[in-house]
Amino acid sequence: MKHLHYCTAFTLTLLLVATSCKQALPPQTEFKMGTVCSINLFEKGTPQLYSEIFQRLTDLESILSANRNDTNIAEINAKAGIAPFKAAPETLYVLQTALLYSEKTQGAFDPTIGPLVKAWNIGTEYAAVPSPEVIKKVRSLIDYRKIVIDPVKGTVFLPLPGMKLDLGAIAKGYAADEIVTILTKHKIKKAIIDLGGNIFAYGEKTPNKNWIIGIRNPENPDENSILTIPVTNKTIVTSGVYERFFEQDGIRYHHILDPATGFPVNNDLLSVTIITSISINADALSTSAFLLGTDRGMALINSLPDTEAIFINKKHEIRVTPGLKNNISLKNTDYTVIQ
Ligand code: FAD
Ligand code: MG
C-alpha cells in the first residue's frame, strides 16, 4: 500500500512537471496604452505570469493615461486652478522623474505639455494644425515649474485653469520597469518586453550570449532594421518622427512638440535611440534628446553614466556615443555612421 502511494506521488510529480512545461505559452500581445504590447517569457511563460504582467499594464493605464477621464492624470487636470489631487505613488514617481528631465533640458521636456498635445490631436482623426491664437493660448499654460507637489500629502496641483499633464513621453518606460520588477520577484532570468517599440531585453539570451536588437529605419519603419546592436539586460527606447504624425499641405507634423514654439520640434533628426538600464530614464531621454537636437542631446547623454545613444538624421547620418562605436552593425548602406 505504502509502495503504491509512493508510485502515485511519483507519477503525480511527473505529471505536474509535464503540465508546467506544457503551460509555457507563446509570446503574448495585448493592446495597452494606445499601443501594441508584446511580452516573451520563453519557457517560463505561464498563463498566470502573463496575466499578472498585463494586469499591471492595465492598472498603470488606469492611473497614468491622459486619454481617459477616470485616471489620476484626468483628475489632476480637471482640478487645475481649483484644488490639489491626492495622487497614487506611481503618479508622483513618474511625474517627479519627468521633472528631473525638464530641469536637464531647460524645459524642452515638459510634462505640462498636455494642452498642446490636445490642441494638435496627433494620432487621432482630428489631427490638424491649430490656429496661431490657440497655439499662443496653450503655450501660456505650459510650465513645469508651476506644478505644486506636496510630497507629504502626496498631492499634485496645477495652479492655472486649463493646465494639463501628459506623461506619454515617459510612462511606457515606467511600465517596462514595473514588468521587470514582476520578473525579478518571480526570479525569471530572461524576457523580451516590447511596449510599442519601448524595448527591455531582460537578462541574458543564453549564457554569455547577447540579444541582438534591430533599430528601425525611421523613414521606412516597416522595412528591415537599419542597424543592430548586441545587448544584455538593457532597455532600448526610440523617439522618432515616424511614431505618430499627420500630413497637411504636404508638410509632415509629428508628435514631439516644442513648448517654445508650440509646433513639432523642427531639427535635422529622424530618430533618437537610448540604451541604458532603467526604462523610465531611457523613455524620458529619447524624447529629451530628440527635443534638444544632435549637439545638445549628445552632450546630455554623454554627461550621464551607463547611457548610450544613436542619433539618426535627415542626411542619413548616424551618430553614436563612444561606447557603441565598435558595437553596432550597419545593415542599410543608404546610411553612414559618422565617427
Ligand atoms: P515619446 O517620444 O516617448 O513621447 C512623445 C509623446 O510625449 C507625445 O505623443 C506627447 O504625448 C508627449 N510629448 C510631446 N512633446 C513633449 C514635450 N515637449 N515634453 C514632454 N512630453 C511631450 N494613445 C492613444 O492613442 N490612445 C490611448 O488610449 C493612449 N493611452 C495611453 C496611456 C498611457 C498610460 C500611455 C503612457 C500612453 C498612452 N497613449 C495612448 C500613447 C501616447 O499618447 C503617446 O502616443 C505615446 O506615449 C508616445 O510614445 P512614444 O514612445 O511614441 O514617443
Ligand atoms: Mg519617450
Image: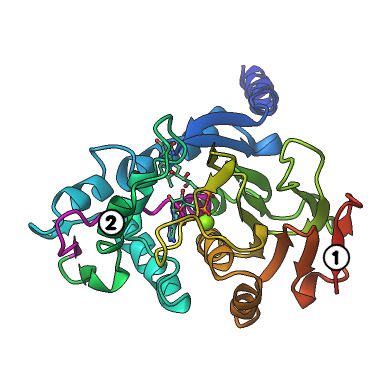
Q: Is residue 49 visible?
A: no
Image quadrant assignment for residue 28: top right
Foreground of the two, 208 or 17 = 208
Q: Residue furthest left?
A: 82
- Queried on whether the Cβ of the residue with tag 1 lies below 8 angstroms from ligand 1, the answer reads no
Membership of 31 in magenta stretch: no
Check the picture and name the quadrant holding the N terminus: top right
Instruction: From the viewer's side, name the closer residue of 82 and 259.
Output: 259
Give neighbour class at mark 2: few <14, some 14-19, many 20+ (Cα, 10 Å): many
Residue sitting at x 56%, y 54%: 184
Residue 337 is marked as: 1
Residue 27 sits above or below residue 177 on the image:
above
Please tell me the numbered disc located at residue 138: 2
Separation (CA) of disc 1 from disc 2? 39 Å
Horizontal side of residue 225 vs 170, given as left or right: right
Q: Quadrant of residue 235?
A: bottom right
Residue 251 placement (x, y as % from top left): 57, 44
Range of residues picked out in magenta = 154-178
Q: Is residue 160 magenta?
A: yes
- Does any portion of residue 99 appear in the rendered image? yes
